[in-house]
Image (tube, grey):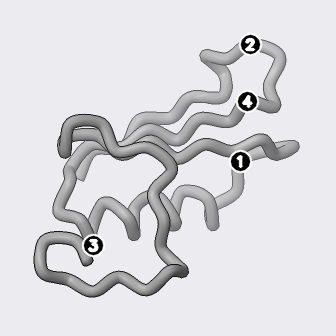
Amino acid sequence: MYKGINIDCGYRVDLLIEDNLIVELKSVERRLGVHEAQLLTYMNLSGINLGLLINFNSKVLKDGLKRFVL
């Protein structure tokens, strides 16, 4: 249950920072649209406007970061 919304176990945010930032962690060969859609869904359901998608499977971490703002 989050803010009066019953969220089934299919939706689990990796990290929620001070109710202001959702962080979705991945370790995949390359980032796909489905990963971005997953983060955007979490953001829409929670009403949080800021998100980070982090892919740890990249040579340089900054190449694996993508910021989302609704």
Distance, label 4 to label 2, CA atoms, is 9 Å
**Counting residues from the N terminus, which is met first, the one under dot 1 or under dot 4?**
1
Q: Are marks 4 and 3 in contact (CB under 8 Å)?
A: no
**Res 1 → quadrant:** bottom left
Label 4 sits on a secondary structure element that is loop
> Which residue corresponds to mark 1?
31
Q: Which residue is mark 2?
A: 60
Count neighbours of disc 1 (C-alpha within 10 A) and say few if under 14, some if 14 to 19, many if 20 or more: some
- Circle 2 packing at 10 Å, graded few (<14), some (14-19), many (20+), is few
Residue under the image location 23 percent in, 53 percent down = 70
- Left or right of 55, for residue 48: left
First in sequence: mark 1 vs mark 3? 1
Disc on res. 45 = 3
Rounded to the nearest whole Å, what is the CA distance between mark 2 and mark 3?
31 Å
| Residue 65 in picture, x, y percent from top left | 56, 28
How far apart, in angstroms, are the residues tagged by discs 1 and 3? 22 Å
Residue 69 occupies which quadrant of the picture?
top left
Question: Helix, strand, or loop for circle 1?
Answer: loop
The amino acid pointed to by label 1 is: Arg
Residue type of the residue flagged with mark 2: Val
The three-letter amino acid code for the residue at tag 3 is Leu
* Amino acid residing under circle 4: Phe
